[in-house]
Amino acid sequence: MLQIESPLVSVDWLHEHIEAENLIVLDATISKVTDSNLGIDFGYIPKSQFFDIKMKFSDTSGKFPNTLPSIEQFQRETQKLDIDNNSAIVVYDLHGIYSSARAWWLFKYFGHNNVAVLDGGLPEWFNKGFNTVSNYETSQSQGNFIAKLKTSLITNFTGVKSFSSSNVALVFDARSRKRFSGETPEPRKGLRSGTLPNSVNLPYTELLDSTTLKSKEQLKQIFNNLINHQETLVFSCGTGITACNLALGATIAGYEDLVVYDGSWTEYGTLTRNTMEVPNWTKNEFMAYILLYAAHSDFKEDNHERNVIISKVDMQTFQKIHDEFSGDNDYQCIQKILASVERHNYSPENIDEILADIKGLFFADGDFDIKEHSMLLFLKRILK
């Protein structure tokens, strides 16, 4: 059985081992904001199956893009790709090394270490003149892969706040220098510019020579130039994709205590306030606002929900807050909610009561759908 000894393999290595019985080849391509390569018909590497990060290997009901799927979802979808516990997995993408590192890190997080990124990806395979095929391979059987979480590899909003204030951890941001500095806006509509506290910028492209990773010695020098005494390296980006490229480079350079911030700047920039006036709401006005925000989990409030909100406050308060809410974008809504919770100094018991009222709102029409369930989980996470 083929055992992969490195997190990175060359196209020559893959070409040599392409017929290995336990080899699984996965195309983990996702598009960039600007795609120059997607018009080129490279074909696919033989034995390729599509590893669909966006729709199969992310939480599609989550508030933020590309966040972790559940263990059940990851296990189910990998088994559909005929992946076994002893499979040797090589992941690649159309850009060289862009999203393939995310797939590699996901496998490590879910307990599968016999996996590597293809250095240079499909462009490098194509440039070497190796054979390509015109279609993905279709899995003929169900795999037996059983996932086991390695939770230390991923952190969340609470965890990254702790890391960013720790003197033994260093947070790296893989976004471009102009996004990191705020000179260019974030590509995600409504997301503010900014950086995580005490983070340093290392654009993932600086680890590359065109489409392939730089040498181990070069990678080690790049990281050494930024690391002082820190032992834990934490990686962030826009949505958790290219943060994994930094994790790949650091792994090859010999670092071991590595963590990826799953929500990355999209989550952090949304859940933290920049410069915004704290609304001077009464508790009733705050209740009207958060219930309106929850009601719009499906982008509208129906009569059942409206009646529930009015019963909690009064018509005058409802109308006043509804006018304000109608003029706010999603980012402003979240910031106002967080600011008001802090201003009123709500206790954990108060928060539980608010969440119970939100759940009651959702059941007002006799149904509790997936969007409402996701909204409740999101509000529970940010309020607690």
Image: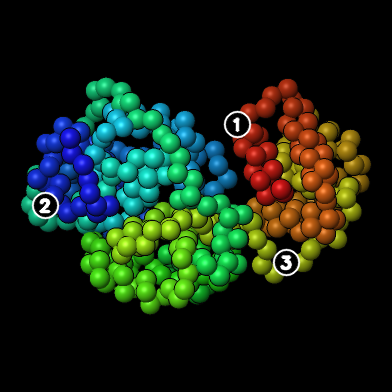
Q: Decide if residue 357 is in sight here.
A: yes
Labels 1 & 3 near each other (Cβ < 8 A) = no
Image spot of residue 129 (x, y percent): 7, 52
- Check disc 1: other Cα within 10 Å, few if <14, some if 14-19, many if 20+: few
x 76%, y 59%: residue: 339
In the rendered structure, the answer to whether residue 160 lies left or right of residue 200 reads right
In the rendered structure, the answer to whether residue 212 lies left or right of residue 170 reads left
- Check disc 3: other Cα within 10 Å, few if <14, some if 14-19, many if 20+: few
Q: Which residue is mark 2?
A: 12
The amino acid type, in three-letter code, at marker 1 is: Ile
Query: Of marks 2 and 1, which one's residue comes earlier in the chain?
Result: 2
Query: Of marks 3 and 2, which one's residue comes earlier in the chain?
Result: 2
Alpha carbon distance from label 3 to label 2: 54 Å
318 over 268 or under it: above or below: above
Of 313 and 79, the residue lying toward us: 79
166 over 62 or under it: above or below: below
Of 348 and 135, the residue lying toward us: 348
Image spot of residue 261 (x, y percent): 50, 55
x 27%, y 22%: residue: 141
In the rendered structure, the answer to whether residue 267 lies left or right of residue 289 reads left
Alpha carbon distance from label 1 to label 3: 31 Å
Q: Secondary structure at mark 1?
A: helix
Q: Which residue is mark 3?
A: 276
Image spot of residue 372 (x, y percent): 66, 34
Tag in front: 3 or 2: 2
Alpha carbon distance from label 2 to label 1: 46 Å
Q: Which residue is mark 1?
A: 370
The amino acid type, in three-letter code, at marker 2 is: Asp
Image spot of residue 25 (x, y percent): 23, 40
Query: Of marks 1 and 3, which one's residue comes earlier in the chain?
Result: 3
The amino acid type, in three-letter code, at marker 3 is: Met
x 32%, y 43%: residue: 113
